[in-house]
């Protein structure tokens, strides 16, 4: 895209209208993103007079400054719309299950489609504008109280957040910053501050002993009177502790062990067991009572 003042002014107009994304505003006017950023860089250098444009007034200013002015104009419009919404609220289209809700014609509500058509209304009963388009249902949303308070605080001080700080200073107080010169190696090492004074112990002498009265001295060293009545000593009687009752031995009930299990054997089982315990030649698999039961089993060598 060839560089021209009309193209740069058009981009600034698009940004001022509310398109704050610069690359999108440039593409809407047929300028590529790369060309836009190249123009901005060349404008910041200030070496080419071709980047001086008349926006928003007739005064010439660089292209990047005009872009910043256009963004400022868009921000002012955003603030104005916010203040208008905080004053009157806004209308919002009603949706139900993701679909727009359309207004019904109040004259055709409750009528059958045939009766609506006979009376000259639409069969679906929806309200339409002069172009025949359905009109959506809108709901009025009141502005939030916090937004209203913010708008009032921007114009009136009594609605803003007030913070009062009271600082009371007594005596000679100097406020400020004291400037101290920079020290160098020529000044030598810093001076060592003097040692703090050593503490002094104040030894207080003990108080003087008070004189003891004579009556107390005579009473302390006088001998006891043998004729004085002394209270007889009473021996205390101690009750014997009760003997604990003998505990009964624990009774353990032991059950007799069950008798040893004796399997019940039939005649056939007893006969088979007898033949298994006997000689090998007398073993036979014939049942009890058979003729072959007493015959010895033949081997493979018979």
Image (tube, rainbow, N blue to C red):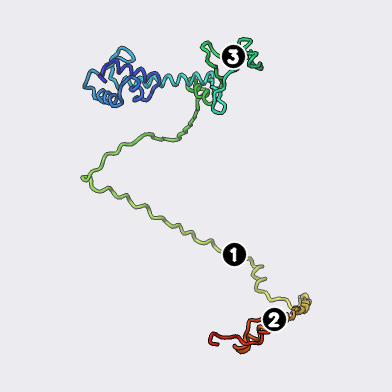
Closer to the camera: disc 3 or disc 2?
A: 2
Identify the disc placed on residue 268: 2
Whether tag 3 and tag 2 are in contact, CB under 8 A, the answer is no
Assign a secondary structure to mark 2: helix
Quarter holding residue 236: bottom right
The residue positioned 57% from the left and 22% from the top of the image is: 101
Closer to the camera: disc 3 or disc 1?
A: 3
Question: In the image, is 21 to the left or to the right of 104?
Answer: left
Of residues 255 and 14, the one nearer the viewer is 255
Residue 259 place in picture, x, y as percent: 73, 81
Determine crowd level at label 1: few under 14, some 14-19, many 20+ residues with C-alpha closer than 10 A.
few
- In three-dimensional space, the C-alpha distance between marks 3 and 2, rounded to whole angstroms, equals 105 Å
Determine crowd level at label 3: few under 14, some 14-19, many 20+ residues with C-alpha closer than 10 A.
some
In the image, residue 188 above or below residue 9: below
The residue positioned 39% from the left and 22% from the top of the image is: 19
Question: In the image, is 287 to the left or to the right of 30?
Answer: right
- The residue labelled by disc 3 is 122
Of residues 108 and 183, the one nearer the viewer is 108
Residue 183 place in picture, x, y as percent: 25, 42
In the image, residue 126 above or below residue 236: above
Assign a secondary structure to mark 3: loop
Q: Quadrant of the C terminus?
A: bottom right
- In three-dimensional space, the C-alpha distance between marks 3 and 1, rounded to whole angstroms, equals 129 Å
Going from N to C along the chain, the mark reached first, 3 or 1, is 3
Determine crowd level at label 2: few under 14, some 14-19, many 20+ residues with C-alpha closer than 10 A.
few
Residue 139 place in picture, x, y as percent: 57, 21
- The residue labelled by disc 1 is 211
- In three-dimensional space, the C-alpha distance between marks 1 and 2, rounded to whole angstroms, equals 128 Å
Q: Is residue 233 visible?
A: no
């Amino acid at each position: 895209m060839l560089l021209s003042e009309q193209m740069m002014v058009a981009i600034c107009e698009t940004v001022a209208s509310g398109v704050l994304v610069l690359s999108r505003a440039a593409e809407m006017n047929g300028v590529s993103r790369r060309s836009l950023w190249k123009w901005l860089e060349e404008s910041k250098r200030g070496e080419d007079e071709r980047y001086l444009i008349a926006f928003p007034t007739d005064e010439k200013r660089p292209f990047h400054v005009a872009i910043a002015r256009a963004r400022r104009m868009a921000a002012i419009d955003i603030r104005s719309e916010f203040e208008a919404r905080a004053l009157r609220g806004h209308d919002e289209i009603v949706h139900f299950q993701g679909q727009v809700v359309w207004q019904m014609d109040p004259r055709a509500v409750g009528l059958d489609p045939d009766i609506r058509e006979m009376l000259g209304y639409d069969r679906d009963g929806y309200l339409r504008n002069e172009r025949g388009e359905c009109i959506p249902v809108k709901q009025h949303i009141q502005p939030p109280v916090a937004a209203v308070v913010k708008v009032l605080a921007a114009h009136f001080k009594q609605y803003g957040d007030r913070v009062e700080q009271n600082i009371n200073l007594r005596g000679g107080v100097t406020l400020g910053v004291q400037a101290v010169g920079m020290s160098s190696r020529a000044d030598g090492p810093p001076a060592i501050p003097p040692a703090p004074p050593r503490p002094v112990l104040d030894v207080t002498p003990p108080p003087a002993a008070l004189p003891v009265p004579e009556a107390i001295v005579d009473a302390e060293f006088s001998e006891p009177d043998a004729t004085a009545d002394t209270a007889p000593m009473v021996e205390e009687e101690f009750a014997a502790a009760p003997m604990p009752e003998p505990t009964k031995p624990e009774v353990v009930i032991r059950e007799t062990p069950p008798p040893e299990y004796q399997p019940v054997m039939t005649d056939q089982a007893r006969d088979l067991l007898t033949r298994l315990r006997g000689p090998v030649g007398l073993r036979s698999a014939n049942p009890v009572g058979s003729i072959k039961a007493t015959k010895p089993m033949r081997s493979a060598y018979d």
